[in-house]
Amino acid sequence: MKILQISTASYTIGGMSEYVRNVSSRLARNHDVTVYATNPSHRLPQNEIIDGVKVIRFSGFNPNGAYYLSLSMLGELMKNKFDIVHAHNYHGFPFHIARFSGKNVFCLSPCYHGSGHTSFRKKLLQISQFVGQSTLNEANYIFAASEFEKNLLLRDFDLSKKEVLVIPRGISFPEFDIDLEEKHNGSKKNILFVGRLVDYKGIQYLVEAMPKIDSNISLNIVGSGPLKQFLMNRIKKLNISDRVKFYQNLDRKDLVKMYHDADLFVLLSKFEAFSKVISESLYSGVPCLVANNSALTEWIDNKVCFTLNNPTDINELALKINDIIYRKFDPLEVRNTFLGSKIIDWDEVVDTLEFYYNKKMGAL
């Protein structure tokens, strides 16, 4: 099959790019796969082949790392024909122009949050709902990453005549093939956060809690974003610079080691359609503490994944961390709790997508 994957991001590492990249590289083993991506920094090649995937990046406008407006992508979409067109990320322009491409089967992975991350984006999301409904109406399949995301889509749009299917995000099991029995259990403990450094991810609450957390506990922050300078200033003011370290642009091997060495993973995000970092943490044998909202609620079992009544209550957050981080967890039990249900390998994700691609193509 001739397949086009459409990404709002630049097809590099992390976030939406990582999902599209893992799916596309595996599909390319048996199919002719092209990815249309964006190039907001203009630093990446316009055309390249990565793991057998033809990647074409388009210039565009992405204010504050959002929307990814690209008229040149629209022009290219209207010129070409594919068997399958699969677009990702409802909150970006490429998702909505994907329907203008020549195609036999049209699939969507919305990664829909149901709200904007700022007041302006909330208002824009409301205004654009008509456009969103039109895009979703065109789809043969809509793939949600969680039951939570599926329910948001059903709440906000009329999808009574559409198939909305839940396919969790995958992880690469071979990357994490580290002996869990070797996990350290010393007196020094560390918390891990992996994600974009923006308000809605809640990393600021974790930083504020650090002075109230036992002094032998450190915090590793992996990621970049507009909140980084603010966080660095607060860390200095709170006099905890010796306990907090920042990392970014880690290769996968180093990131896997960060997971493996962590004692607790914390994510206090307001908006998550799935959360692959929770999947990767649990598969690494690391218990998690998450906010009690969005798709994060589907991970909470209070055995290996815990929650707070109010993630912005710094005292409650500190007490919870001090409690959980000293408990004895069996890493294999942590890994196996969601294995096969919410934690699946990328190969299984692609097998499922291929099944639906072929099902619809066979019906034409």
Image (spheres, rainbow, N blue to C red):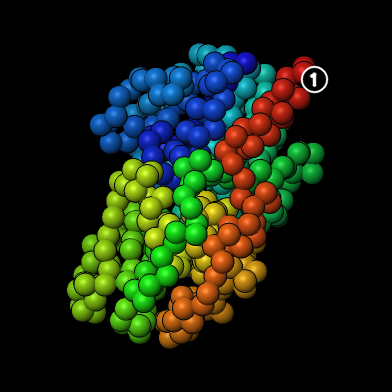
Instruction: Report which quarter residue 299 is drawn in.
Output: bottom right
Query: Residue at coordinates 38% horizontally, 36% vertically from top-left?
Result: 12
Q: Tell me residue 172's x, y (percent).
A: 52, 41
Identify residue for label 1. Answer: 363
Quick one: 120 or 6, which is closer to the camera? 6
Query: Residue at coordinates 28% horizontally, 55% vertically from top-left?
Result: 247
Q: Is residue 207 visible?
A: no
Q: Is residue 286 above or below residue 238?
A: above
Quick one: 137 or 324, which is closer to the camera? 324
Query: Residue at coordinates 62% horizontally, 22% vertically from top-left?
Result: 84
Q: Is residue 157 left or right of 345 when viewed as pictured?
A: right
Quick one: 289 or 175, which is closer to the camera? 175
Query: Residue at coordinates 68% horizontally, 51% vertically from top-left?
Result: 341
Tell me the quadrant of the picture where the C terminus can be found: top right
Q: Is residue 248 left or right of 172 when viewed as pictured?
A: left
Q: Is residue 244 above or below residue 97?
A: below
Tell me the quadrant of the picture where the N terminus can be found: top right
Q: Is residue 258 visible?
A: yes
In the structure shown, which secondary structural element does the residue marked by tag 1 occupy? Answer: helix
The amino acid at mark 1 is Ala
Quick one: 120 or 201, which is closer to the camera? 201
Q: Tell me residue 268's x, y (percent).
A: 47, 67
Q: Is residue 313 above or below residue 153?
A: below
Numbered circles on residues, count: 1
Q: Tell me residue 94's x, y (percent).
A: 49, 33
- Give neighbour class at mark 1: few <14, some 14-19, many 20+ (Cα, 10 Å): few
